[in-house]
Image (tube, grey):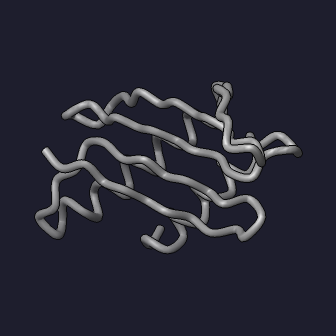
Amino acid sequence: MNEDQIYLNISELLSSVAPADVVAVKMSAELSPETSSCKLEYDAVRPDGSEFWLVGGGDVNSKMLDLLVDLRRIYLDRNSDWRKCVAELDVAKGKMKFNFLYS
């Protein structure tokens, strides 16, 4: 799977957990050094800017881990080692924003 497909699949997963009344969905991830596990947190943003916590669920979390591991491998091939990232999906515009935190 190429990098663009990974980003697309991540945005589709975030969209799948988004309640109907939100403007954005955020995902924070922290991968373990051996990339076999990941701490995931999801938040939704209401039109007034307030945020609330979302549950991704086992299937979404499992798929997200696989995608993030694949994405990290691409970055490692470029000598870029990140273990944490924050992704935000603007639901109305369908645009993704990623911030990577490097070790």
List x then y, in percent, for residue 22. Answer: 78, 46
Residue 76 is situated, as x and y percent measured from the top left of the image, at 19, 59
Residue 1 x/y as whole percent:
47, 67
Q: Which residue occupies 67% across, 28% down?
A: 52
In the rendered image of this protein, does residue 32 appear above or below residue 98?
above
For this view, does 46 lie left or right of residue 100? right
Could you tell me how many numbered marks the image carries?
A: 0
Q: Is residue 91 above or below residue 33?
A: below
Q: Residue at x 52, y 30 (%)?
A: 41
- Of residues 101 and 59, which is closer to you in this image? 101
On the rendered structure, is 89 left or right of 70? right
Left or right: 87 as drawn, with respect to 25: left
The C terminus lies in quadrant = top left
84 in relation to 5, above or below:
above
Instruction: Tell me: 64 left or right of 81.
Output: right
Q: Residue at x 21, y 34 (%)?
A: 34
Residue 62, position as x, y percentages in the image: 55, 34
The answer to which of 65 and 21 lies nearer the viewer is 21
For residue 26, what is the image quadrant? top right
Viewer-proximal residue among 2 and 85: 85
**Residue at the limit of the structure toward the right, as seen here:** 20
At a point 29% along the width and 37% down the height, the residue shown is 35
